Image (cartoon, rainbow, N blue to C red):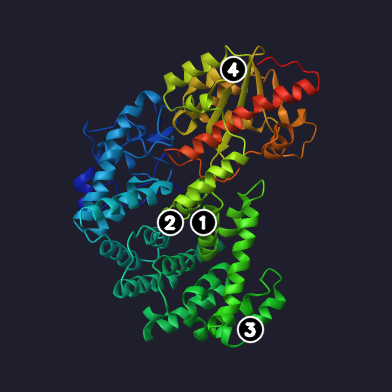
Amino acid sequence: KHRITCHATPSTVQSFGPPIMSAAWPARRRRHCRLCQRCFVVCPADWGTAAGGVAPLCGCTAGVLGPSMALLPLLCGATLLFCGGNGGCGENRANSAPAGDRLAATLVEAVRSEDPRHFLAVLRLGVRSDQRFRRAVAAVDVAAAEGLPSTDFLLECLDELAAEPAEQSDSATLVGLLSGACAVAADGRARRRALDAALKISVRPSMGSKKEISRPIRNAVRAIYQWNISNYDVEERHLKPLGELFDNLLRIRNWDKALDLLFRLPVAAPHSSIFTSNALHQQAREHPALPENLGRLSECVLWGNEEEVSLYITAQKCALRTALRSTKPSKVAYTCCGSEHKLDWCVEAALQEGMIDFALEMSQSEWRRPPLVQEAHRTAAQQRHGRLLQLPKAVAASITVVDDEQEALAALALLREHRTVGLDVEESRGNGFAVLLQLATPRQVVLLDLQALGACTELGEAWAALVADGEVRKLGFGGMQDLQSVARLPGFRAACRQVKPASYVDVQQLGGKSDMGLAALTEQVLGKPLDKSLQVSDWSRRPLTPGQVRYAALDAWVLLDLFNALGQKTDIRASL
């Protein structure tokens, strides 16, 4: 079950060293990293290392690793498999910078040499999946600044991905990702070439779950949308595959992508066997989940009824702006992530409402280039900030992001000198692991990067001592789930298992309403709500954006104000 396949090309081997071909990982070859205590696989002598045997390193020295990058240590010159850690401990992070710089330089060099196979191999082998879009955009931008044909290079990458065998499961995902990295408007020839690649991907057979089966279809529509392909780019040979693509979208009941395809390419509908047989209206009656107006709207798009389509778009945009003004605008992200046209409208509405950080987050998380922020948007943002609770300027200037173990130990030691500390935890989207720990005092906020520090046992012991210290009051919100989330980290697990939290106060229970969220309670008690627009942000991405840093710091610091106000009302004397 631990078998991997090497995708290295001759250029990759020249850059990173000899490849490791497919090989099983027997249990007897597993060891533990001396830095992060995670399990890794040693390199047998017949694979060849500089020492001629087992290399005394693990993937921590590469600095940008994860469970999906088995060959990552090739970046630092060691021919061994990955460590399961999240970047190594602080004492070893100095070794990670050269690997990151080398990775960026290698991607740029692959674009300069017009070698798409090398570029794709580096993306697959050396870049975490959540960083691939950012790395690809950076490499393409450098090439474009040097006057290189970056659009042609991306098209060559799409052709290469479309020609890969069906067993290569991430080809469709990379097609969607690289389509969003294009920086300039493509001409008709380029759009037709992108359409060819998208249609080849869409008919690729897939096995597994419903999500895996629909991945080629979804990413084909994403590519069509991102390359701005219109009816004018469609040739006779494209009509039948487009009709089949529309049929497949209706069969898997992906209504959002079906509308995306209709808005971008209405010519696809007449060549759909489902649409032309009026079965769409039958499906609307049989499946309540199908939007009632899908059949009518698709007919309006097909027959050019621009007035009714315009009314639909205006109504949708107004609904989005109204939802963004609510106390939890992040809920809008869930409704828009599956639809390309809704995502465009959501980003546009967010900018008009002054939610610049939210618009940038939505764009990056959905593999899109950041939108153009105008002066009117900045003015709206300033007006919006005046209506929301903000950190005091002195506290905002003292926010510290810590990713070094020794600095983190010193920060925890200073925190134990305070009587009250507010704490909050941000978790990653996919697996729910704690990736950021926020600790606040009245005058300072410390953000501990748990992706870099989560495997450090000494820090885990220091954190357990703080949790068990009855002299320090810990303020949380919503029970003890934040403490439990941190206690599941590898470096913290053993120490936290032996201690019992002391002097922990749940501010939500102190407010007397267990069903009230932090933003609503803040507005009720302090008079202004919190900005929760980044609640669904990708907290595992590094580096954190300035908006994420402010959001995370305020979530922990506001607990101190709430406790002080609620404590006075309930005769709990809190002297901060």
Tag 2's secondary structure?
loop
Q: CA distance from mark 1 to mark 4?
A: 42 Å
Q: Earlier in the sequence, mark 4 or mark 3?
A: 3
Residue, x 33% and y 45% (percent of image)?
126
Position of the C terminus, as image quadrant, is top right
Q: Residue 368, which numbered label? A: 2
Q: Which residue is mark 4?
A: 466
Inspect the image, locate mark 2, and give the three-letter code of the amino acid beneath it. Arg
Viewer-nearest of discs 1 and 4: 1
Q: CA distance from mark 4 to mark 3?
A: 64 Å
Tag 3's secondary structure?
helix
Q: Earlier in the sequence, mark 2 or mark 3?
A: 3
Please say whether residue 253 is visible from this viewpoint.
no
**Mark 2 and 1 residues: CB-CB less than 8 Å, in contact?**
yes
State the image coordinates of residue 342 (x, y, percent, origin top left): 55, 63
Q: Which residue is mark 1?
A: 347
The quadrant where residue 495 appears = top right
Q: Neighbour class for label 1 at 10 Å: few (<14), some, many (≥20)?
A: many
Q: CA distance from mark 2 to mark 1?
A: 11 Å
The quadrant where residue 33 appears = top left
